[in-house]
Image (cartoon, rainbow, N blue to C red):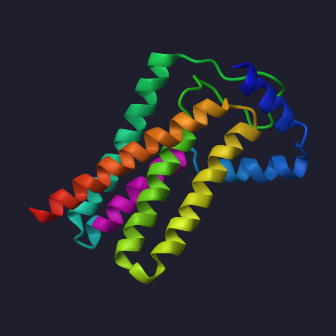
């Protein structure tokens, strides 16, 4: 944890009001309330367009993300870093980063779905999702509300849910 603490202090030396505003705005894209809305809206739109298996997959991955985050936070009960006054306060336990886990699942799955729908632009969708998910995770570290390992755990959990959801969807579509 000393290495993580040193990294947070070092990163904090680059902070500025402008960067704070940028990363606060960016971190909102991974807020669990925002992601819940986006998962629900996506599932409803997919259901409306008669893409039922995709709609169920989107809803299932959103619910699974929420459950896994809550479960792991309860198991690990890791305290958040309190190294300086936060410009964007966060509450609850630290591991894993729910913003990071949820955004990896939602934006990763959206990129995968759009890539399947528009294969010519697959690389662009993946690149945008990778950049967005990376920046959302970095924003949690920059703001000092998560340890770097919390963000890493969120990315790993998100990738596992994303892989499981996509595998399930492909199996389901073959039936």
Q: Residue at x 73, y 47 (%)?
A: 24
Residue found farthest to the bottom: 120
Residue 66: where, in percent of width, then height? 42, 37
Q: Is residue 90 visible?
A: yes
* Range of residues picked out in magenta: 32-46
| Location of residue 144 by image quarter | top right
Q: Residue at x 52, y 38 (%)?
A: 154
Q: Is residue 148 left or right of residue 56?
A: right
Residue 54: where, in percent of width, then height? 27, 62
Using the image, determine if residue 39 lies above or below residue 32: below
Q: Is residue 71 left or right of residue 14?
A: left
Residue 112: where, in percent of width, then height? 40, 65
Residue 17 lies in magenta, yes or no?
A: no
Q: Residue at x 89, y 43 (%)?
A: 14
Q: Quadrant of the C terminus?
A: bottom left
Q: Is residue 62 visible?
A: no
């Amino acid at each position: 944890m000393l290495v993580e603490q040193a990294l947070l202090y070092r990163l904090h030396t680059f902070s500025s009001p402008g960067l704070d505003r940028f990363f606060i705005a960016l971190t909102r894209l991974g807020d669990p309330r925002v992601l819940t809305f986006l998962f629900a809206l996506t599932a409803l739109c997919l259901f409306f367009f008669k893409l039922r298996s995709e709609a169920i997959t989107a809803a299932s991955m959103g619910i699974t993300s929420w459950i896994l985050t809550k479960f792991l936070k309860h198991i690990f009960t890791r305290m958040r870093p309190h190294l300086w006054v936060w410009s964007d306060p966060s509450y609850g336990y630290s591991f894993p980063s729910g913003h990071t886990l949820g955004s990896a699942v939602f934006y990763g799955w959206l990129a995968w779905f759009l890539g399947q729908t528009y294969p010519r632009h697959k690389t662009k969708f993946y690149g945008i999702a990778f950049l967005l998910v990376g920046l959302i995770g970095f924003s949690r570290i920059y703001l000092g509300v998560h340890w770097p390992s919390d963000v890493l755990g969120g990315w790993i959990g998100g990738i596992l849910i994303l892989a499981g959801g996509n595998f399930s969807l492909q199996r389901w579509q073959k039936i």
